[in-house]
Image (tube, helix red, strand yellow):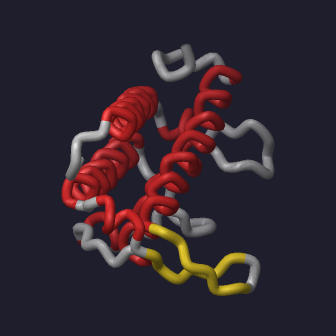
Amino acid sequence: MAEENFTLTTFFTQWKAYQDRLAAALAPLTAEQLALRAAPDLRSIGENAAHIIGCRVGWFTYTLGESASAELTEVQWDAPDGPAQSAAELVRGLNQTWQMMADCLDTWSPADMQQTFPDEMDGEIVQLSRAWIVWHVMEHDLHHGGEISLMLGAHGLKSDFTS
């Protein structure tokens, strides 16, 4: 991180550990396992993972204007009825988006974190700080990662992520 801060370093280090456990939990899953759902109208395990990746790509490239590889930006990670991604593709997407975010966080200063960006919320344009966007991406990872953990456990697919 650009400037050493114990609290921020702790959050970032633990977020990375969470990311690594999520990737490790997804890596061995078959296409059939990635298609498992908690209920018919909810996202599958694989769709939730793709949704996490799509969120990262969207906020960092579209909203913040950061660059990412074509390999990341050309995939419609979260498109309704889009093609299912394999476990290897999802793990690669998680790792590549993590590296993209880590590279940004390594260079942003406290002043950069205060910079605001326009976004639409509830039909209104609001200004969101870079810090808020990073927090939102982290809490989004945690929320949907929790859904993945629940589905893995509910379907008897134990991993270090669910323990």
Determine if residue 55 is in view. Answer: no
Name the image quarter holding residue 53: bottom left
Image spot of residue 25 (x, y percent): 44, 27
Q: Residue at x 45, y 56 (%)?
A: 134
* Location of residue 80 with respect to 146 vertically, above or below: below
Q: In this image, 45 relative to 6: left or right? A: right
* Residue occupying the point 26% across, 60% down: 109
Residue 48 drawn at (x, y percent): 58, 48
The residue at 49%/40% (across/down) is 31
Q: Tally the marks.
A: 0
Quarter of the image with the C terminus in it = top right
On the image, the x and y values in percent for residue 123 come to 74, 85
- Image height of 92 relative to 61, above or below: above
- Residue 9 appears in the rendering: yes
The residue lying at 47 percent from left, 34 percent from top is: 30
In percent of width and height, residue 59 lies at: 45, 68
Q: Taking 66 as reference, is 31 left or right? A: right
| 91 lies left or right of 30 | left
